[in-house]
């Protein structure tokens, strides 16, 4: 089982105070994953987001393709 998020800072896996509210300019991963041990397979999709003062978090990974057909197109070009 993999956790769904962690803080990001100067070190990739910065330790944050999980009992404190998120604040503007905090950066977190959003990385749901599924692992099937019997098949030796797993996948995790990661977005890195910045908490904004107002509005939705800003997705730093928003321009990176994650759909299978997008990745296949890049690999075949």
Image: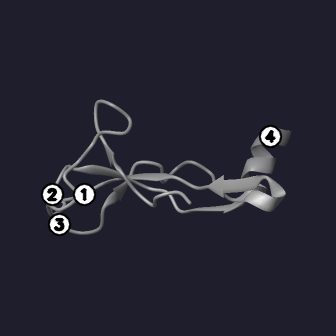
Gap between marks 4 and 2 measured at Cα: 38 Å
Q: Earlier in the sequence, mark 4 or mark 1?
A: 1
* Residue 59: x %, y % from top left: 40, 55
Give the crowd class for mark 4: few <14, some 14-19, many >=20 residues within 10 Å.
few
Q: Nearer the viewer, mark 1 or mark 3?
A: 1
Q: Residue at x 46, y 58 (%)?
A: 3
Quadrant holding the N terminus: bottom right
Q: Nearer the viewer, residue 27 or 20?
A: 20
Quadrant holding the C terminus: top right
Q: Residue at x 74, y 58 (%)?
A: 37
1 with respect to 5 (left or right): right
* Residue 32: x %, y % from top left: 53, 62
* Residue 75: x %, y % from top left: 80, 40
The residue at which mark 1 appears reads as 51
The residue at which mark 4 appears reads as 75
Give the crowd class for mark 1: few <14, some 14-19, many >=20 residues within 10 Å.
some
Gap between marks 4 and 1 measured at Cα: 32 Å
Q: Nearer the viewer, mark 4 or mark 2?
A: 2
Which residue appears farthest toward the front when viewing the image?
38
Give the crowd class for mark 2: few <14, some 14-19, many >=20 residues within 10 Å.
few
Secondary element under disc 2, as helix, strand or loop, is loop
The residue at which mark 2 appears reads as 23
Secondary element under disc 4, as helix, strand or loop, is helix
Q: Nearer the viewer, residue 8 or 49?
A: 8
The residue at which mark 3 appears reads as 54
* Residue 18: x %, y % from top left: 23, 58
């Amino acid at each position: 089982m993999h956790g769904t998020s962690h803080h990001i800072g100067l070190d990739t896996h910065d330790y944050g105070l999980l009992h404190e509210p998120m604040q503007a300019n905090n950066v977190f991963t959003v990385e749901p994953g599924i692992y099937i041990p019997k098949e030796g397979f797993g996948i995790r999709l990661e977005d890195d987001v910045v908490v904004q003062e107002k509005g939705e978090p800003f997705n730093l990974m928003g321009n990176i393709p994650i759909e299978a057909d997008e990745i296949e197109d890049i690999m075949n070009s």
